[in-house]
Image: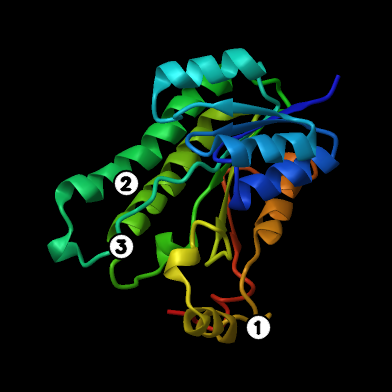
Amino acid sequence: MEPVALITGAGRGIGAATARELSRRGYRVAVNYHRDAAAAAAVAAETGGTALRADVRDPAQVAGLLAACGPPDVLVCNANITPPFEPLLSMPWEAFIGKVQGELAAAYHLTQAVLPEMPPHGRIVYVSSLSAELTRPGAAAHAAAKAALDAFARHVAAEASPVTVNVVAPAGVRTEGSAAARTPETEAALAERSVLGRMIEPDDVARVIAAVADGGMPAVTGVRIPVDAGYRVLGGP
């Protein structure tokens, strides 16, 4: 029987690339989405998987999602809550806490629902961001949410054995979701500050997620793996 990989936010970007990569590795993928049914259907058709709508911040919808796909061997928590990018002093509390609460609600409800049903070889991967350890103007909500996710993942790892639990934390990734915040100038600046001299692509992140999820790292748990093309090596701000 094919192992099952449930990937949240899998209609585009990192989630879609991860669905494709895990499908190539023999997984039956459950392509979770919230809004863009057409994009998720396209990924499902390409991978032979199933597109499943659910807002993973809602425990009732999470329960329905799992009823549809069954207990997964791999859970990739990738669904992104769009953060506000503005100075903290002008950011409404509702915008700030909406990002932080949404990020943690998705991880919390998915983990509580999935972990008790996972097989011993199960893998959980949370998709975080290098923003959790960097400081840049306007990113307080995003950074706080991802830092909280990193801490949450460590505590899940401490309780989940023999299931392994890890975090993959990319730097700026060239995705549809980040397109509005990218310009040729910002892309060039990011490339210049990385050892490899380029932006991160969704496939770069997907391959790391798949390597962690596919059983090749059975003794690795509770760690945070950066995917940054060497950005931190050069001390990127």
* Of the image marks 3 and 2, the number of the one nearer the N terminus: 3
Amino acid identity at mark 1: Gly
User: Residue 197 bears which disc, if any?
Assistant: 1
Please report the residue visible at 49 percent of the width from the left and 85 percent of the height from the top: 185
Quick check: can you spot residue 156?
yes
Please report the residue visible at 37 percent of the width from the left and 33 percent of the height from the top: 105
Kind of element beneath mark 1: loop
Looking at the rendered image, the quarter that the C terminus falls into is bottom left
Foreground of the two, 48 or 166: 48
User: Residue 85 bears which disc, if any?
Assistant: 3
Q: Nearer the viewer, mark 1 or mark 3?
A: 3
Kind of element beneath mark 2: helix
Give how far apart the Cα atoms at labels 2 and 1 are. Answer: 31 Å
Rendered location of residue 158, percent (x, y): 52, 34
| 219 sits to left or right of 106 | right
Please say if 237 is above or below 53: below
User: Residue 230 bears which disc, if any?
Assistant: none
